[in-house]
Amino acid sequence: MDIRQLTYFVAVAKHKSFTKASLALHVTQPTLSKMVRNLEDEMEVVLFDRSSRQIGLTDAGAVVYEQAQKIIHSIDDLSTSLYDVMNLNKGKIKIGLPPVISTLFFPTIIAEFQRAYPEVSIILAEDGAKTVERKVAEGDVDLGFVMLPVDKEKFDVVPFVDQEIKLLVHESHPLSHHDTIDLIEFKDDPFLLLSKEFTLNSRTIEFCVSEGFTPKIAYESSQWDFIVGMVEKNLGVTLMPKLICDRVKDGPFKMISLSHTFPWRLGIIMAKNRYVPYVSREFISLVEKLPKV
């Protein structure tokens, strides 16, 4: 058994197809099939159920798949560690984050980091926090910026932002004269939320329920500026981070504080027990030194 056999096996398991895996690996399908067969022969087990059009793992295959991923990650970590020793100022960082976070913070963060490390490439993958967490756990990105809390058994966390969520309404709303209010006063209003792939969606619903009502969701969007635009047209109310509300304070809006605090805490997450490359550690260090908001 060697690392190439395990890599090929994992690719077939992920793609659930020898054809798709061979394309992804840039090898011929016969070569891939032979490699997997050799692995099965060496282990004296059948790894794939080939009885249907879409192949699947056998019970033995599932066990090997779990361990093979760990072995491949360990080899990758070793390669990265050696690269770090030889190239302290080069490399790339893959970062997963929701669009709200990228808009608010990343122009400043990237400008500061690239002044210090001009040869480091930063690759951003904008997704909802749930997808970001999955990508960090699976090693598709090095770091994730998400709303906290997260599962600390899966992730190491570096706190990044500690703010509050505010209620944003149109200035003509009958309750817009309030500076602080109980959220239940808006139980009959249409709510405008970020899409379900964003943690703020589920947290908003949970917070409303804790306040004594289930929100009437009128629209959901992956773009915070679209939601703010809907409030501007007086089509509903929304709960948004104070930083977003501050950005639109010159428009026809009223930002209202909540009687019961709705926290907006962000953090940098890394997969538990995974090697963190030098450039990623330097990136985290720079973020920690930036003024807190």
Image (spheres, rainbow, N blue to C red):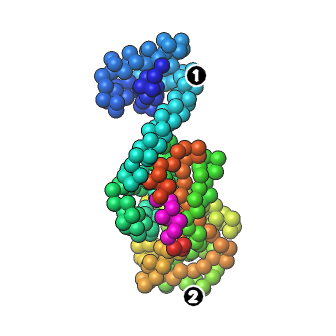
Labels 1 and 2: the sequence-earlier one: 1
Query: Residue 110 at x, y = what percent?
Result: 39, 64
According to the picture, the residue beneath numbered tag 1 turns out to be: 59
The residue tagged with tag 2: helix, strand or loop?
A: loop
Outermost residue, bottom side? 177
Q: For the stretch drawn in magenta, what is the main secondary structure?
A: helix
Q: Nearer the viewer, residue 228 or 79?
A: 79
Q: Nearer the viewer, residue 274 or 66?
A: 274
Q: Residue at x 50, y 13 (%)?
A: 42
Q: Which mark is residue 177?
A: 2
Q: Specify whether residue 8 is painted magenta.
A: no
Check the image and report above or below for 210 versus 11: below
Q: Nearer the viewer, residue 146 or 166?
A: 146
Check the image and report above or below for 149 versus 186: above
Q: Are marks 1 and 2 in contact (CB under 8 Å)?
A: no
What type is the residue that disc 1 sits on? Asp
**Does residue 148 appear in the picture of this structure?**
yes
Query: Residue 148 at x, y = what percent?
Result: 59, 59
Q: Nearer the viewer, residue 164 or 3?
A: 3
Q: Residue at x 41, y 43 (%)?
A: 83
> From which residue to which does the magenta span run?
283-290
Q: Residue at x 44, y 38 (%)?
A: 79
What type is the residue that disc 2 sits on? His
